[in-house]
Image (tube, rainbow, N blue to C red):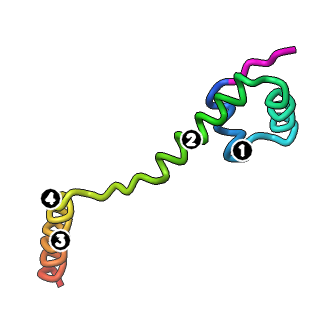
Amino acid sequence: MLQIYTENELLLYFYGELSQEDSQAIERELAVNTDLQTKLNNLKSAIGLIAQLEEEPSKTSIDLVMEYSKTVSETSTEKV
């Protein structure tokens, strides 16, 4: 019997967050369902691309945080 699995279930499977029973059920379905194999492979590819992203905060954001930190530090020093 063909079982329908959601992307969420496939993600849980990929990250090892399903019960052993549920993982085995997905593995049995993957063995015979090429559409499910394709969905899982697409999710793996997307996760791999996301992992490659190297996002950094903008210089403006860093400057604002540093300025705020300096202000807070000066304020707390004045109270002592």
Tell me the residue that label 4 is attached to. Answer: 60
The mark lying in front, picked from 2 and 3, is 2
Residue interval drawn in magenta: 1-5
Upstream in the sequence, badge 2 or badge 3? 2
Upstream in the sequence, badge 4 or badge 2? 2
Counting other residues with Cα less than 10 Å from the Cα at mark 1, is it few (<14), some (14-19), or many (20 or more)? Answer: few
Name the mark on residue 45: 2
Give the residue type that dot 4 points to: Thr
Residue 45 located left or right of residue 37: left
Residues at marks 3 and 1, CA–CA distance in whole angstroms: 42 Å
Tell me the residue that label 1 is attached to. Answer: 17
Please tell me which residue is depicted at 79% across the width and 18% down the height of the picture. Answer: 3
Name the mark on residue 72: 3
Q: Quadrant of residue 39?
A: top right
Give the residue type that dot 3 points to: Val
Secondary structure under badge 1? loop
Give the residue type that dot 1 points to: Glu
Work out which residue is located at the far top of the displayed protein and give it.
1
Residues at marks 3 and 4, CA–CA distance in whole angstroms: 18 Å
